[in-house]
Image: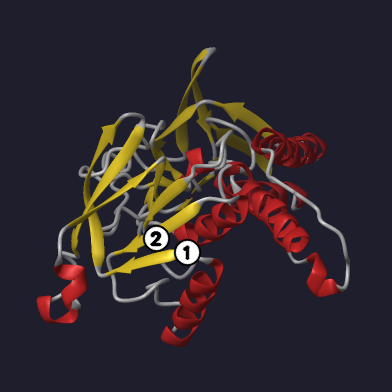
């Protein structure tokens, strides 16, 4: 049996390795690097920066542990980013070695599902067609960008950009108080930034998996850390002034008027050296040929599957 997998992130490479161990002939198509978001722009690099932030925080609290003496520790962002890159590179090499050991064929390029188990790949070496018995779509996601808040990768940054900063912004505005925004807020506060988090809902971490008690706890920890929080407000636009970015705030359009406190209904501005846009993720399905192959998606763009993760096209999973 032949299996073709599109996407070399945790979903794709895990499926590839398991199938190869079971004796399946596997082709894994990846347009960038094995490891996907988790390894390169998500969990692992973020936790690497978090480790540096924790080390700084511990140094600042040495006297609490009975250690005397002054230690003036400051973040060296070039060294922190270099360490992060080394960690991800080491783990990527490990994945590549595992793929080679298991005889997983890795093809670099942009893939398109054609149908009947056929996948077309556009690579630097030209077009390649891969035929198989089953196909798994595991293409992951990318940072969501808002039309009203375009990312310029200079002053207005995505979460990917936030992991590559070579300097610590004096004042940082984080747009979106979800999981990614909160984590980056704490990290850069530990690095020395003055941080303001802007969230359009009535609480920090307004996601189904987090109850209100946990949101209140995180917000208390933000207050203790010196992180400012603007709830029930959104950033409607940004403009640049003398190398800084000015964020224009207004009342959240996602809430009924009576749910917005009077203070949050006022227009306002925040001037900062950088703005992080962390308002969610969007699926990497453009160019996959889903509509042409009659593979259905939901209103958010996620591929529709049954309880066995099979799409409406037999033999194609996601």
Q: Position of residue 51 (x, y in %)?
A: 72, 55
Q: Give the structural element (helix, strand or loop) at label 1.
A: loop
Q: Position of residue 75 (x, y in %)?
A: 68, 44
Q: Name the residue that disc number 2 marks.
A: 197
What residue is shown at x 19% (from left), y 65% (from top)?
Answer: 252
Where 282 falls versus 255 (above or below)? above
Q: Residues within 10 Å of mark 1 (few under 14, many from 20)?
A: many
Q: Name the residue that disc number 1 marks.
A: 227
Q: Residue furthest front?
A: 69
Q: Give the structural element (helix, strand or loop) at label 2.
A: strand
Quarter containing the N terminus = top right
Q: Residue furthest top?
A: 125
Position of residue 216 in the picture relative to residue 264 (left or right): right
Q: Residues within 10 Å of mark 2 (few under 14, many from 20)?
A: many
Q: Earlier in the sequence, mark 1 or mark 2?
A: 2
Q: Position of residue 70 (x, y in %)?
A: 81, 56
| Res 261 seen here | yes
Q: Position of residue 17 (x, y in %)?
A: 71, 48
Where 175 falls versus 108 (above or below)? below
> Which sits in the foreground, 253 or 209?
253
> Which sits in the foreground, 41 or 140?
41
Disc 1 to disc 2, C-alpha distance: 7 Å
Q: Residue furthest left?
A: 257
Q: Dots 1 and 2: beta carbons under 8 Å?
A: yes
């Amino acid at each position: 049996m032949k299996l073709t997998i599109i996407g070399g992130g945790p979903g794709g490479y895990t499926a590839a390795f398991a199938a190869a161990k079971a004796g399946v002939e596997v082709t894994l198509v990846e347009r960038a690097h094995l490891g996907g978001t988790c390894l390169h722009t998500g969990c692992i690099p973020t936790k690497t920066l978090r480790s540096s932030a924790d080390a700084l925080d511990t140094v600042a609290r040495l006297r609490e542990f009975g250690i005397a003496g002054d230690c003036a520790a400051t973040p060296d962002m070039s060294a922190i980013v270099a360490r992060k890159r080394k960690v991800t590179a080491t783990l990527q090499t490990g994945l590549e070695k595992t793929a080679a050991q298991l005889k997983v064929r890795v093809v670099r390029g942009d893939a398109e599902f054609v149908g009947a188990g056929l996948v077309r790949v556009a690579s630097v070496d030209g077009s390649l067609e891969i035929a198989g018995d089953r196909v798994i779509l595991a293409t992951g996601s990318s940072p969501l960008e808002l039309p009203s808040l375009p990312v310029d990768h200079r002053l207005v940054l995505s979460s990917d950009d936030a992991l590559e900063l070579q300097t610590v912004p004096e004042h940082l505005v984080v747009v979106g108080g979800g999981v990614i925004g909160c984590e980056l807020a704490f990290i850069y506060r530990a690095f020395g930034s003055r941080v303001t988090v802007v969230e359009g809902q009535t609480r920090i971490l307004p996601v189904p998996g987090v109850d209100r008690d946990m949101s209140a706890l995180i917000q208390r920890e933000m207050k203790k850390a010196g992180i400012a929080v603007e709830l029930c407000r959104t950033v409607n636009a940004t403009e640049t002034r003398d190398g800084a970015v000015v964020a224009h705030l207004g009342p959240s359009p996602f809430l009924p008027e009576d749910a917005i406190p009077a203070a949050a209904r006022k227009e306002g501005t925040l001037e900062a050296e950088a703005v992080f846009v962390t308002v969610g993720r969007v699926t990497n399905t453009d160019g996959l040929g889903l509509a042409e192959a009659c593979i259905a998606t939901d209103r958010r763009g996620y591929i529709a599957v049954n309880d066995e993760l099979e799409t409406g096209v037999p033999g194609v999973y996601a």
